[in-house]
Amino acid sequence: ITDLEPESLGAFLRLQLLAIDYNNLTHIKKDWFTELKPPNELLMLSLSHNNILDIEPKSFAGLTSLGRLILEHNLLRFASPEWFRGLTNLITLNLASNRLESLP
């Protein structure tokens, strides 16, 4: 998988776990998860083992129930607080094995 169409997730009304691991994603776009309309029940999102270089601001903004976000084993060089804005229930954020130079 190299890209994700937002409407591809719209049919999953009670989705709690979404793993899009071991693909060739390079960017996370802010509209990818917009079809998971609030109140959605997504508790865990894993995007590990891709080639993610960048995440658009507010990409996860509508995922208000999200408790775990796994972004390990990608190519991220920095982490922006704007990526995580609105994730009020986030407990676990895994950024291991990226190319991070610092955290804000």
Image (cartoon, rainbow, N blue to C red):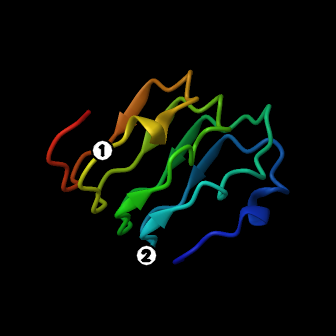
At 26% from the left edge and 49% from the top edge, which residue is drawn? 78
Which residue occupies the extreme left position in the image? 101
Residue tagged by mark 2? 24
> Looking at the image, do the residues carrying marks 2 and 1 touch, with CB atoms under 8 Å apart?
no
Disc 2 packing (10 Å; few <14; some 14–19; many ≥20): some
Q: Amino acid at mark 1?
A: Leu
- Disc 1, SS: loop
Instruction: Work out how far the residue at label 2 is from the one at label 1, CA to CA, in angstroms.
Output: 17 Å
Quarter location, residue 87:
top right
Which image quadrant: the C terminus? top left
Which image quadrant: the N terminus? bottom right
Quarter location, residue 10:
bottom right
Q: Is residue 43 above or below residue 5?
A: above
In percent of width and height, residue 51 lies at: 35, 69
Sequence-first disc among 2 and 1 = 2
In percent of width and height, residue 80 lies at: 36, 41
In front of the other: 64 or 42:
64
In percent of width and height, residue 82 lies at: 46, 38
Residue tagged by mark 1? 95
